Image: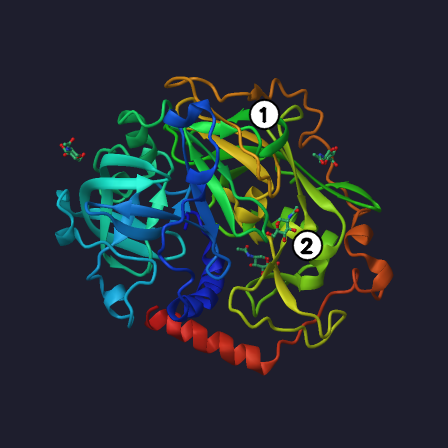
Amino acid sequence: MKQWRPAVVILSLMLASSARGQVVPWGLERRRPGQTLLRGRSEESTFEEVIINEKGTGGYFATVTVGSPGQDLVMQLDTASSDTWVPYTGAPICEGLTSGCPMGTFDPHASKTFKEVTRDQFEVSYVDQSYSSGDYFADSFEIGGAVVQNLTMGLGLKTNIPYGLVGVGYPASEGALTTRGLVAYPNLPISMQEEGLINSVAYSLWLNDLDANTGTILFGGVDTKKYIGPLIKIDVIPDEGIESYTHFLVSLTSLEATSPTGTDILTSPEGPVEVVLDSGSTLTYLPNDMASKVWKEVGAEYQDIFGMAVLPCSHGSHPGYFSFGFGGSNGPRINVTMDELVVDLTNGAPPRFTSGPYDGELVCEFGVQNYSSGPFVLGDTFLRSAYVVYDLENHEIALAATDFNSTKSEIVAFRSKGASIPFATAAGEDDGGANAALPTSTTLAAAEGFQDLDDADSDSAATSLMIVVGRGLLALFVSTATMAVVGW
Ligand SMILES: *[C@@H]1O[C@H](CO)[C@@H](O)[C@H](O)[C@H]1NC(C)=O
Ligand SMILES: *[C@@H]1O[C@H](CO)[C@@H](O)[C@H](O)[C@H]1NC(C)=O
Ligand SMILES: *[C@@H]1O[C@H](CO)[C@@H](O)[C@H](O)[C@H]1NC(C)=O
Ligand SMILES: *[C@@H]1O[C@H](CO)[C@@H](O)[C@H](O)[C@H]1NC(C)=O
């Protein structure tokens, strides 16, 4: 649920929203697999929360407890916003649903430790036009076994989102500042450090495989058994002009496509692309020119009816990968394979292509979409392939290739406030080798390998795909959209 989300994503949200109203994605029973893991010596200064990959709505959700006695809620984890807020039990969106908001709500009257902070000053809005507003309050907040005694949170009295968010971004992006012009307050990562739960304002995110049900967020440390190869750090880019950090903005300096038939450089001629690492965005958004090259490689095509680039679901088993390079030629590189880039449409019944070369095949959304202006977004379709450490003290991000489905754990805490990321090495000076100076490939040698053309009509890659969507889907789409306008 990021603030940069391009308007086009509204379409997928609308599709998702009907599912939300009908299905309880999971019960509210406590999920604490992390507590049963053997933990290293750093146990006392790191906290690990299992996050659930909610494939129906998209996004990663944490089970938290608010107030005393504790009230259980399941909330979306978001690296691109900075407020933690809970839906109020009496919020119209929850009262409008027969069984209330299925992921839980907060009733201030039922908490003995509830303290109002400011009335009517909480307001956040996200670019997908979802919002939440109400009061700021302070109460206890438990995540991954860590209990923050006095966390400032938003109470969503009016919202169109039926669950709360745990925003773990920079305080400069808090709603209090961005919409009310108030001073920043210590948000979750900062409060955890201030209350002595973790040593430094930092955490690591391991989203794991697209097909896995869970990943983890580790506050205050790094788990060296969740990645392969070196952990390399790069700088977060401050906001232009104000020299202040608002988002996890980093420099994407190269993009290469590799398949059995070759390697192509797809970097934008406009040079390095500034991208926000956003766990709240299910898809990745690159500049139009880069995105269309990526689509040509894999045989995806933008379709107005979906408002996005789509391709046959079967392409998820095709060979080939994209290599995302950061911070210049010596920076980290993350390879993302096709099986992480072909995502089911979120509305349950998958439509089929009804004409063209993909006639009869199931339609999936492609993990890389386009947008016309920056900052661009690396969402979950990228982030799952990386282990990412967010250091909000030193304004550094460390990246390594993820170890998919790792069941091992060796947790190392940040030693002190402001200590550098354990085990991470600096990217070093850019020698310019892999940078935008290189010409972008004009012919796409890798495309044939990506599209596995042996088993398909070999003309299909070159010719434009004409996809006629069946009327059944169109009707479904229209009715879902109408529902979304009326309210979830
Ligand atoms: C809890 O936090 C609020 C808001 O920051 C603050 O006004 C209050 O004094 C704090 N209470 C305690 C006991 O620290
Ligand atoms: C990880 O586990 C999921 C099932 O939980 C499986 O579908 C997937 O293929 C596994 N990924 C890898 C890379 O082994
Ligand atoms: C990632 O891709 C690059 C470029 O093709 C390759 O050199 C590198 O070995 C790959 N890394 C891993 C971990 O597979
Ligand atoms: C994405 O690409 C399609 C096809 O080129 C175009 O119609 C659409 O406007 C683009 N979206 C944005 C946000 O630029």
Q: Which mark is residue 232?
A: 1
| Left or right: 461 as drawn, with respect to 275 | right
In the rendering, at what x and y percent does residue 25 appear?
A: 43, 62
Report the residue at 74% width, 65% height from top. Answer: 464
How far apart are the alpha carbons under marks 1 and 2? 29 Å
Q: Is residue 356 visible?
A: yes
| Left or right: 334 as drawn, with respect to 163 | right
Q: Is residue 374 visible?
A: no
Is the CB of mark 2 within 8 Å of ligand 4? Answer: no
Coloring scheme of the render? rainbow
Q: Nearer the viewer, residue 257 or 288?
A: 257
In the rendering, at what x and y percent does residue 357 appear?
A: 77, 70
For disc 2, the neighbor class at 10 Å (few under 14, some 14 to 19, many from 20) is many
The residue under label 2 is 295
Q: Marks 1 and 2: CB-CB under 8 Å?
A: no
Is the CB of mark 1 within 8 Å of ligand 3? Answer: no
Q: Quadrant of ligand 1?
A: top left
In the rendering, at what x and y percent does residue 417 appear?
A: 37, 19
Q: Nearer the viewer, residue 348 or 450?
A: 348
